[in-house]
Amino acid sequence: MTPDTISTLVTKFAQFFAFLALCSAGSSFLPERAAAQQREPSDTVQQFPVGKHPAGLAFDGTNIWVGNAGEHHVVKLRASDGAFLGAVRVGKHPGGLIFDGANIWVTNVEDDNVTKLRASDGVVLGTFAVGSGPLGITFDGADIWVANVNDDNVMKLRGTDGALLGTFDVGSFPQGVVFDGANVWVANEISRTVTKLRASDGSLRGTFAVGVSPVGLGFDGTNIWVANLGDGTVTKLRARDGFLEGSFRAGGSPVNIAFDGTNIWITNWGNSHNRDSVTMLRARDGAFRKRFPAGQPWGVLFDGTSIWVANEDNYTVMKISPDR
């Protein structure tokens, strides 16, 4: 990475987080939802210390992996009880994490590469160059897809050895990526769109308008959910054809999404009324279910039983086991 590129990357990320702060100060949401902030007594919430500025999360079937952007390493926790199992040094500013069935892949935003770790023991199996500012990452069952925020493209890497299989243009400032079983979807934050690419060859299947500043994506088995941090909403698109199923208030500045089989979980980076929270919506119709206070939450995932949230502000991950 050249000095000019580093400067551009740092400037863009500074602008991005400044924009988050602006959204936090100015966002609003429906009054009835402001009254429903507290979790139910039967919900179980635990917090586990990890490292500085945890952001990305991955689940390997048994353990939770956490990328600590402030310390350039990933931490492995046992999902059953949050016990610390180890830490592995990766590149600078680990952003996104994904599990491929055997390995953990990590995007290193400031190093313009991705790291491949063996999930069983954390051994580094390789580091592979990608584009400028890699952030979002997903796995299509065979290969890895990486969104390069400064290059306005995504790269497809062969899962076995990290070889570059293709580079595909998308919208401006791509961030979140998700696989729907046949296609890769990309959230383009500045373009206010999502791009649908066929996973087999990267061909464009469609571009769809969503809300203001889309950054995070989720898939519920039928629909794509989009976190629009700029307007406090999530957009629901039918994966088959991109048809708009609805737009729903999330509360705050939504940044990432997970699906638990019934509900959509959204991390809200914060807003003036309900700062730093996690919102639960019913996937069927977008109806509000619950909201949990958090600490500047970013990454979110479902481990088959509980929801895990990375709290950047207090250097913890939170495990939520709701009474459904």
Image (cartoon, helix red, strand yellow):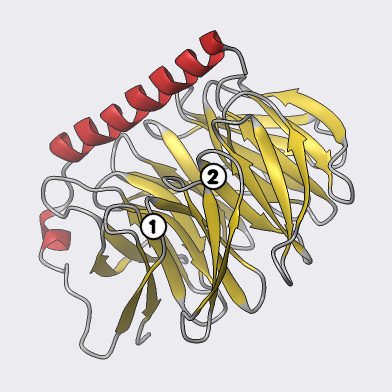
Residue 270 coordinates in the image, percent (x, y): 23, 48
Residue 54 coordinates in the image, percent (x, y): 42, 54
**Numbered-mark total:** 2
Work out whether 323 lies above or below 217: below
Residue 106 coordinates in the image, percent (x, y): 63, 48
Q: Where, quadrant-wise, is the C terminus in this rendering?
A: bottom left
Answer with left or right where residue 157 lies relative to residue 171. right
- Which residue of the protein is positioned furthest toward the top in this rendering? 4
Q: Label 1 belongs to which residue?
A: 266
Q: Type of residue at label 1? A: Ile
**Closer to the camera, 322 or 91?**
91
Q: Is mark 2 on a helix, strand or loop?
A: strand
Answer with left or right where residue 22 lies relative to residue 51. left
Q: Label 2 belongs to which residue?
A: 94
In this rendering, the label closer to the viewer, 2 or 1: 2
For the point 51% across and 82% down, which residue is it?
305
Question: Disc number at residue 185?
Answer: none
